[in-house]
């Protein structure tokens, strides 16, 4: 499926348009590879006077040469194509002086390659910005996919460019509702399955062929040696971090179902404190996330934190590709395919369905303002969805069932029972919610009302009955 049209990203485009209206703006866009940064930029500049420059992993002199030829195409000054420039200041000055009365956009993509070629590049750009670019009618967009480098070179307090930016956008994968905009005729069940593999990463969405069923896509694009996604997590990590082995071990251990830091440490036989640095990096990369029960008022101080793989594709890959690399290397796909067919729904898609359900609750147009939406757990109790509105004293507790039959009274009764045992919410008004992909029994439907929300295939049924 080629992405048929540009979808989602409305809030990011709003930020960029607002920046464009400034006299001079300096916007930083960053995020992991494949997440659609360049596509967003191209959508934004398509009707503007803009020069797009893509930095490469070459020496500084080559990048200056490429900048000049990009400028000569942009400005129609062919004679500059072969002009010799040796420093950045003079080429930026030519850009600023070209049609000074017109608003211009200058995009520098893959910015990290420039600081790689010359560690002082951030200081050079800071001087250029302070001396003349910030006085020109220019919107500068700096974009990069090496998150570690962007944080260090552009966004950290010690960076020469700190304080120069007028806006920053960390681009994340598409949310489920944005993702669905690209597939108008697909069933809810297949949408959740596809989202569970692509995670809303535009590049992965482009690769998958809608005319094939999901298993065929998995075989040809993920399991086949040499296919685009076969080694993707290795590629992502090698670009970002030095010691990939430790990161791999951490992700693999979490994929195997160990979420508490003490469990991860004991599996890998290392002290817990050893991991904090690695967890921090993986969270910056949006590969991991730290979750705490939604009832915790100060999640950052909570001792109940657990670590989960946030990226759906990476979660899938570590569960179903990494452990069977030996078979896949000799192109023995059948046993791996059987394993995926037998386990994918229960051990992967159903968890993604929980995440989708939390997103759907947030977008359901309910008259509450949720401070926190997540899940709840303690020793013997787990609740898939837990959302707190502190000002109204309301807690929504929800159960998600990704199974092929209607959700029945037993599921509802168990949820009510669980809620009674959670002491943190004893003073809250509790609203129950059930999320199903296959509807509800008549008995459950009859209970639907202010205290029971029913979501079928992602849609809130109550609103049809005018709450």
Image (cartoon, rainbow, N blue to C red):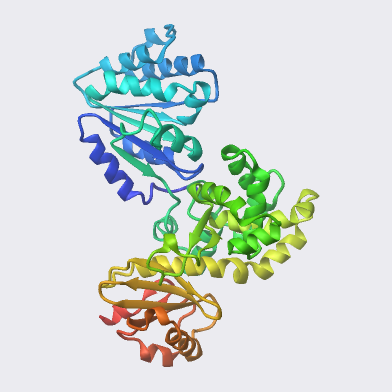
- Compared to 422, does 320 lie above or below? above
Question: Which residue is nearer to you in this view: 9 or 282?
Answer: 282
Identify the residue at image location x=35%, y=24%.
126
User: The C terminus is located in which quarter?
Assistant: bottom left
Residue 329 is left or right of residue 121, and the answer is right
- Compared to 368, does 165 lie above or below? above
Question: Which residue is nearer to you in this view: 152 or 224?
Answer: 152
Question: Which residue is nearer to you in this view: 112 or 198?
Answer: 112
Q: Position of residue 45 (x, y in %)?
A: 32, 34
Count the marks.
0
- Compared to 265, does 455 lie above or below? below
Residue 116 is left or right of residue 464, and the answer is right
Q: Position of residue 50 (x, y in %)?
A: 32, 27
Q: Position of residue 69 (x, y in %)?
A: 42, 16
Residue 180 is left or right of residue 287, and the answer is left
Residue 45 seen in the figure: yes
Quarter where residue 124 is shown: top left
Q: Position of residue 23 (x, y in %)?
A: 20, 30
Quarter where residue 363 is shown: bottom left
């Amino acid at each position: 499926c080629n992405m048929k049209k540009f979808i989602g990203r409305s809030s990011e485009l709003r930020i960029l348009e607002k920046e464009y209206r400034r006299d001079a703006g300096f916007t930083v866009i960053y995020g992991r590879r494949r997440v659609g940064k360049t596509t967003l930029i191209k959508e934004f500049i398509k009707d503007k006077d803009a020069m797009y420059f893509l930095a490469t992993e070459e020496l500084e002199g080559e990048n200056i040469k490429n900048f000049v030829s990009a400028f000569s195409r942009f400005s129609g000054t062919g004679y500059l194509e072969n002009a010799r420039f040796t420093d950045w200041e003079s080429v930026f000055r030519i850009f600023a002086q070209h049609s000074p009365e017109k608003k211009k956009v200058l995009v520098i993509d893959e910015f990290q390659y420039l600081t790689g070629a010359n560690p002082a590049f951030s200081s050079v750009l800071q001087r250029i910005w302070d001396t003349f670019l910030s006085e020109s009618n220019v919107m500068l967009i700096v974009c990069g996919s090496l998150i570690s480098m962007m944080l260090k070179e552009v966004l950290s307090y010690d960076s020469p460019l700190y304080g120069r930016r007028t806006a920053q956008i960390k681009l994340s994968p598409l949310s489920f509702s944005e993702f669905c905009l690209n597939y108008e005729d697909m069933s809810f069940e297949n949408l959740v399955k596809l989202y569970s593999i692509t995670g809303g990463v535009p590049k992965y969405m482009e690769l998958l062929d809608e005319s094939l069923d999901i298993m065929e896509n998995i075989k040809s694009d993920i399991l086949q040696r040499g296919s685009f996604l076969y080694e993707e997590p290795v590629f992502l990590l090698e670009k970002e971090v030095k010691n990939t082995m430790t990161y791999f071990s951490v992700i693999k251990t979490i994929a195997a179902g160990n979420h508490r830091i003490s469990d991860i440490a004991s599996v890998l036989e290392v002290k817990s404190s050893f991991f904090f640095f690695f967890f921090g990096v993986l969270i910056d990369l949006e590969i991991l996330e730290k979750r705490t029960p939604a009832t915790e008022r100060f999640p950052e101080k909570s001792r109940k934190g657990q670590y989960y793989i946030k990226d759906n594709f990476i979660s899938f890959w570590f569960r179903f590709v990494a452990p069977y690399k030996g078979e896949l290397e000799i192109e023995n796909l059948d046993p791996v395919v059987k394993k995926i067919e037998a386990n994918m729904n229960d051990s992967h898609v159903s968890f993604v369905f929980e995440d989708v359900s939390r997103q759907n609750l947030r977008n359901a147009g309910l008259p509450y303002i949720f401070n926190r939406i997540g899940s709840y757990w303690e020793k013997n109790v787990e609740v898939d969805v837990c959302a707190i509105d502190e000002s109204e004293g309301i807690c929504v507790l929800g159960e998600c069932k990704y199974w092929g039959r209607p959700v029945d009274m037993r599921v509802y009764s168990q949820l009510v029972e669980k809620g009674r045992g959670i002491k943190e919410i004893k003073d809250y008004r509790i609203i129950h919610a059930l999320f199903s992909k296959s509807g509800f029994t008549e008995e459950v439907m009859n209970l639907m009302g202010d205290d029971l929300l029913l979501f079928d295939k992602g849609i809130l049924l109550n609103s049809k009955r005018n709450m």
